[in-house]
Amino acid sequence: MNPEECREDICVTCSDVAAPGTVVRLLDEDMAIVWAEDGRFQEVSVALVTAGVGDVVLLHAGEAIAVMPE
């Protein structure tokens, strides 16, 4: 992604920031809907983690990269 395309002050896709999100629904093909810290639902990949509904995951560039401990 070209940083000039970012519309927010901080673009999570372009930066090295991982943000928490709560899994609200698992989809087919290692995808999930999460409620992200920024107050939006997002469709993300959960292919790298074993996550279930209710789990808090760290999100980076559309990918869940870790499941947070309870």
Image (cartoon, helix red, strand yellow):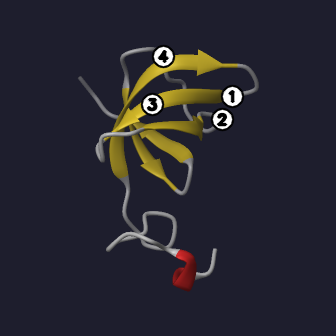
What residue lies at 65% left-to-right and 35% top-to-bottom?
47
Q: Which residue is mark 3?
A: 34
Which of the two discs, 2 and 3, sits closer to the camera?
Answer: 3
The residue type indicated by label 3 comes to Val
Residue type at tag 4: Gly
Residue closest to the eye, 32 or 50: 32
What's the CA distance linking mark 2 and mark 1? Answer: 5 Å
Which residue is nearer to you in this view: 36 or 63?
36
Give the percent coordinates (x, y) of residue 24. 44, 19
Which comes before the other along the chain, label 2 or label 3?
3
Count neighbours of disc 4 (C-alpha within 10 A) and say few if under 14, some if 14 to 19, many if 20 or more.
some
| Marks 4 and 1 in Cβ contact (< 8 Å) | no
Which badge, 4 or 1, is on the more N-terminal residue? 1
Identify whether 29 is placed above or below 58. Answer: above
Picture mark count: 4
Badge 1 marks a residue whose secondary structure is: loop
* C-alpha separation, residue under disc 4 versus residue under disc 1: 11 Å
Q: Please give the name of the residue rendered at 57% of the width and 36% of the height, measured from the top-left corner.
A: 43
Q: Which residue is mark 2?
A: 47
The earlier-in-sequence mark between 4 and 2 is: 2
Q: Which residue is mark 4?
A: 52
The percent coordinates of residue 49 (x first, y second) are: 55, 33
Left or right: 42, with 40 as reference point: right
Q: Residue at x 54, y 24 (%)?
A: 50
- Image quadrant where residue 61 sits: bottom right
Label 3 element class: strand
The amino acid at mark 2 is: Ala
Q: Label 1: which residue?
A: 30
